[in-house]
Amino acid sequence: MNNFEYKEDYDFFLNKLAKNNIPIFKKEYYKMFDFRDSKIKREEFDKIRNDIFKKLVYKYGEKCQLNIHKDCSKEKIFDVDHYIPLSTNELNKIIRGMKPKNGKKVPAQSFGSNDISNLRIACKRCNAFKKHKII
């Protein structure tokens, strides 16, 4: 996984994803990352969203896999969510302490992929609550 721009970003995801404190980036996580421009990934996702949703519902049922909002699944409206967001500015804020300049947002980085391993079913509430955050 040498496509990370910063080593500390790699370390951040390693700590988030690695199980049992094993100090390696497991192969099963490779497909969850795609460092291409997020606009390209969003266009690709829009074309596969419906098919992916059907596959996830078939595999997991029509229920929220995030379960992070107090009103989870209250409205029974579901969508596909990227576990690792296509792009986020979270690491630039958290790790590098970047602040917005002149009313603009902190720059975002491209991380997540459209691979089914990085996709989850999320209810409307949890998806809106999560936004581009890394949970």
Image: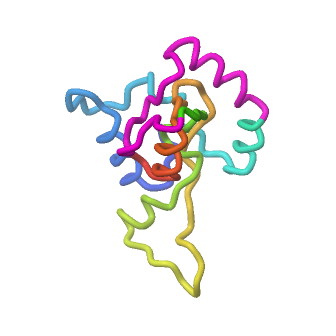
| Quarter that holds the C terminus | top left
Please indicate whether residue 37 sits to the left or right of residue 108 in the image: right
Please indicate whether residue 53 sits to the left or right of residue 59 in the image: right
Task: Give the residue furthest to the left.
Answer: 20
Residue at (59, 36) in percent of width and height: 113
Residue at (30, 32) in percent of width and height: 18
State yes or no: residue 49 in magenta.
yes
Residue 21 image position (x, y, % from top left):
21, 32
Residue at (71, 21) in percent of width and height: 51
Eyeballing the image, is 87 above or below 105?
Answer: above
Residue stretch in magenta: 47-75
Residue 15 image position (x, y, % from top left):
29, 41
Eyeballing the image, is 58 above or below 130?
Answer: above
Residue 81 image position (x, y, % from top left):
55, 37
- Which residue is more in the foreground, 61 or 80? 61
Q: Residue 50's image quarter?
A: top right
Task: Give the residue furthest to the top.
Answer: 58
User: How many marks do you count on the picture?
Assistant: 0
Residue at (53, 71) in percent of width and height: 106
State yes or no: residue 16 in magenta.
no
